[in-house]
Amino acid sequence: MTEQQANFLAELAPAVQRFSSRTGLPASVPLAQAILESDWGRSALAREHNNYFGIKAKPRPNGSDAAHYTTTEYADGKPRREKARFAHFASLEDCLADYARILALARYARARAVAANPFAFAVELQRCGYATDPRYARKLALLIRRYKLTRFDLPAERSAQVDST
């Protein structure tokens, strides 16, 4: 792990652990998502807009609170580049609050039901449509394992985890 990566985790982990203790969701998964979606905090979306999870912006009448970036989306398993509107946040905490709001939607009930297992949670996030990349859950699992991100999960979550990928 590079010094920049260690610093990124040291900065994000406390906020994500607070999020985890409030929501009951595993900290390891949003940490892996932040690594993947923001390239360890190096993306312009993370640096300039505090958006660590690739959260899209809802259309607003005045078009404010959005950043436009080219992104890769998948349709029928094939990647395509497209312009998208991404949410702008004042802080990491605001980004985490919106992430929590999104994951509280009925659409993600199956993911929340398996939250004690971060690997199953990642699979269900993908199945519920969090990302279009058909390898999204696999990429998250790889990051969780490689960087031992389950060490950031709450003790009760760690004791219930089974690697199901």
Image (cartoon, rainbow, N blue to C red):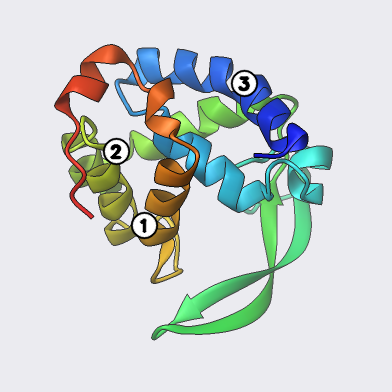
Which secondary structure lies at badge 1?
helix
Q: Residues within 10 Å of mark 2 (few under 14, many from 20)?
A: many
Which secondary structure lies at badge 3?
helix
Horizontal relation, residue 120 to residue 137: left or right: left
Identify the residue shown where x is 15% and y is 26%. Answer: 160
Q: The disc labelled 3 sits on which kind of residue?
A: Glu
Q: How crowded is mark 1: few (under 14 residues within 10 Å), some or many (20 or more)?
A: many
Instruction: Find out whether the residues at labels 2 and 3 contact each other: C-beta distance under 8 Å.
Output: no
The number of numbered badges drawn on the structure is: 3
Which secondary structure lies at badge 2?
helix
In this view of the protein, can residue 86 be seen by the observer? yes
Per the image, the residue denoted by label 2 is 118
Residue 113, percent across and down?
16, 36
Q: The disc labelled 1 sits on which kind of residue?
A: Ala
Marks 1 and 2, Cα distance to the nearest angstrom? 10 Å
Mark number, residue 137: 1
Marks 2 and 3, Cα distance to the nearest angstrom? 21 Å
Per the image, the residue denoted by label 3 is 93
Compare marks 1 and 2 and give the one earlier in the sequence: 2
Location of the N terminus by quadrant is top right
- Which of these two is toward me, 62 or 159? 159
Compare marks 2 and 3 and give the one earlier in the sequence: 3
Compare marks 3 and 1 and give the one earlier in the sequence: 3
* Quarter assignment of residue 65: top right
Q: The disc labelled 2 sits on which kind of residue?
A: Pro
